[in-house]
């Protein structure tokens, strides 16, 4: 769930002036001629889970809107049903969102991690932040992988209500257009799901063809940083060998599912990310398309993506 603009200078004044006018794609003119599967995107794992929004056991300090402004161009998000409720805290009533099933008559759609009781954002509101960003940044392409606990038709309705529908990618998931063509078409948000997607034509089952990935359960930092461990960390997990998009899960999860900024200080450095991405290219024959991290405010996943895109 990345790419910061770079200044292009020519050898002569004329060349420099011409380069300055070149259109940018995800922050660089060099990326415009590349297809999406050949670009590295800085990503956010459980992007919606933010301490700033009052979530318990958050994965990040900052919300999705700030993450995008800082260069995150791929997001892994969770979607569930919930409904408003009240509980007593320190003798006072406190509003929260309670997880419910798909048949609850009062159900609403929320961005939640596993259960809505520990943190929730209305889905239309969250998608609306993505819509605002894409509208104000017309030359950015993004990708999303949803861990869905809701019906595809309900998700599609939320996409429409949020205004995001106009930016959804409608093309092939086996042969991608260049970023320049995606930007020209306006279809700049690639939507994938870990669960069912039918009958929504633009919604793709991630691991049934478009996307392959690494494992995602790493309990200690050395598993993602020690040279001897890197090839093991890149082994195949979900997805199909040869899938065009490749997700490198690059985060530590301490039992019982806790993200710690102290771990991110170690694994989110540019050097650690670049080294592992190159190891994964050797093992899998492909550079990661999405590098998903916890605590995006720590380290330099954006800078790592720039390096891997050969932008510096």
Image (cartoon, rainbow, N blue to C red):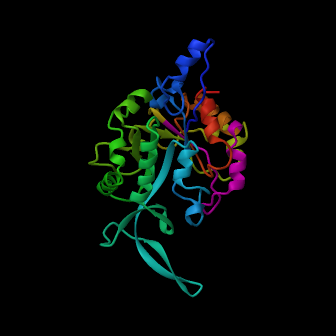
Q: Residue at x 32, y 37 (%)?
A: 170
Q: Is residue 251 magenta?
A: yes
Q: Furthest-bottom residue in view?
A: 91
Q: Residue at x 40, y 45 (%)?
A: 192
Q: Is residue 63 visible?
A: yes
Quarter-wise, where is residue 233 in the image? top right
Q: Is residue 178 visible?
A: no
**In the image, residue 79 above or below residue 243:** below
Q: Nearer the viewer, residue 169 or 129?
A: 129
**In the image, residue 1 above or below residue 150:** above
**Percent x, y for residue 205?**
37, 45
Residue range corresponding to the magenta coloring: 246-271
**In the image, residue 42 above or below residue 102:** above
**Count of marks overlaid on the render:** 0
Horizontal side of residue 122 vs 92, given as left or right: left
**Percent x, y for residue 185?**
34, 32
Horizontal side of residue 158 vs 30, given as left or right: left
**Percent x, y for residue 312?**
65, 27
Q: Furthest-left residue in view?
A: 199
Q: Is residue 254 magenta?
A: yes
Q: Nearer the viewer, residue 226 or 181?
A: 181
**Percent x, y for residue 284?**
55, 31
Q: Residue at x 36, y 42 (%)?
A: 167
Q: Residue at x 36, y 36 (%)?
A: 186
């Amino acid at each position: 769930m990345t790419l910061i603009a770079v200044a292009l200078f020519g050898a002569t004044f004329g060349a420099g002036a011409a380069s300055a006018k070149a259109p940018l794609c995800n922050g660089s003119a060099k990326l415009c001629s590349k297809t999406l599967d050949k670009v590295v995107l800085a990503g956010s794992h459980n992007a919606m889970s933010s301490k700033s929004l009052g979530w318990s056991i958050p994965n990040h300090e900052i919300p999705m809107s700030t993450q995008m402004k800082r260069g995150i161009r791929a997001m892994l998000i969770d979607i569930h049903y919930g409904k408003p409720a009240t509980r007593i805290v320190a003798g006072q009533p406190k509003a929260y969102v309670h997880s419910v099933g798909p048949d609850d008559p009062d159900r609403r759609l929320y961005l939640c991690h596993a259960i809505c009781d520990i943190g929730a954002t209305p889905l239309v509101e969250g998608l609306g932040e993505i819509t605002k960003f894409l509208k104000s940044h017309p030359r950015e392409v993004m990708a999303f992988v949803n861990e869905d606990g809701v019906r595809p038709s309900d998700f599609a309705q939320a996409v429409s209500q949020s205004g995001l529908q106009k930016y959804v990618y409608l093309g092939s998931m086996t042969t991608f257009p260049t970023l320049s063509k995606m930007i020209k078409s306006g279809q700049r948000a690639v939507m994938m799901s870990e669960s069912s997607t039918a009958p929504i034509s633009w919604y793709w089952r991630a691991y049934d063809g478009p996307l392959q990935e690494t494992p995602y359960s790493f309990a200690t930092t050395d598993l993602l940083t020690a040279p001897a461990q890197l090839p093991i960390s890149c082994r195949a997990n979900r997805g199909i060998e040869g899938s065009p998009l490749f997700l490198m899960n690059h985060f530590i999860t301490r039992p019982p599912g806790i993200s710690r900024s102290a771990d991110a200080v170690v694994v989110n450095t540019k050097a650690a990310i670049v080294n592992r991405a190159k190891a994964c290219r050797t093992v899998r024959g492909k550079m990661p398309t999405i590098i998903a991290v916890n605590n995006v405010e720590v380290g330099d996943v954006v800078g790592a993506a720039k390096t891997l895109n050969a932008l510096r």
